[in-house]
Image (cartoon, helix red, strand yellow):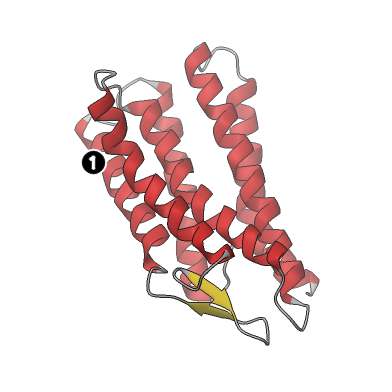
Amino acid sequence: MNSEILVLTNIVPLFGLIYLAVVILDRQALNRKERALFQILWTMEMLDLLADNTQTVMAALPYPTAVRIAAAAVSYSIRPAMILILIALVYHPKNTLKNRLFLLVPEMIAVAASFSALFSDLCFSYDQNNVLTPGPAFFIPYAVTVLYLAVLIFILLWKKVLDREIEKKVIAVTLGFIIMAMICESFMGIDGIS
């Protein structure tokens, strides 16, 4: 692993973490519930960054390890969950079991698919040369992420993001970071930026 790849894979998440820390520390910007959700989001982003860096270090080994597989599963699971937290910040449906399950079921499916890599090749695996091999369910975490992004964009547009509520503006900027990271991953061919 060279320093250029380390910088490329960490620059967007680090800016995101700094941005979220500033939002969390600004006592006037958020109420207690919103601050708690942003703290969860900050923690999830930190875990994702640690998991991605663990994968990058383990990729240098000539063979796959359970640590690399677990780190990848954490990353694939946590990304849609972070967007789900953003949805929770702007969408406040009636707190019924049906509404909560509607939003949680796709994330539970993504977690199950991702962690299936620990005991099967359903979602992904690494070959004997430590190269990622996508399985038939590899698309699931990405599909859930795209689904949650679409829901978040719809909610932001539906609630008119340009009004005076600060959390919607914070969400819009955070959404921009996520989209920018996904574009960087696509064009640079580097996994783990978002």
Above/below status of 110 relative to 63: above
Residue lying at the far front in this picture: please name it.
119
| Quadrant position of residue 141 | bottom left
- Left or right, residue 151 beside residue 77: left
Q: Is residue 194 visible?
A: no
Which residue in the protein does label 1 denote? 154
| Nearer the observer, 135 or 94 | 135
Q: Nearer the viewer, residue 182 or 134?
A: 134
Q: Residue at x 45, y 68 (%)?
A: 123
**Residue 58 shown left or right of residue 44 in the figure:** right
Q: Position of residue 119 (x, y in %)?
A: 56, 66
The answer to whether one can see residue 160 in this image is yes
Q: How far across and how far down the image is residue 77, in percent?
A: 50, 52
Viewer-proximal residue among 51 and 18: 51
Q: Position of residue 6 (x, y in %)?
A: 73, 65
Q: Position of residue 136 (x, y in %)?
A: 38, 74
Q: Amino acid at mark 1?
A: Phe
> Where is residue 70, by image quadrant?
bottom right
Identify the residue at image location x=51%, y=17%: 29
Q: Quadrant of the N terminus?
A: bottom right
Q: Residues within 10 Å of mark 1 (few under 14, many from 20)?
A: few
Q: Is residue 161 above or below residue 31?
A: below
Q: Residue furthest left?
A: 158
* Element class at badge 1: helix
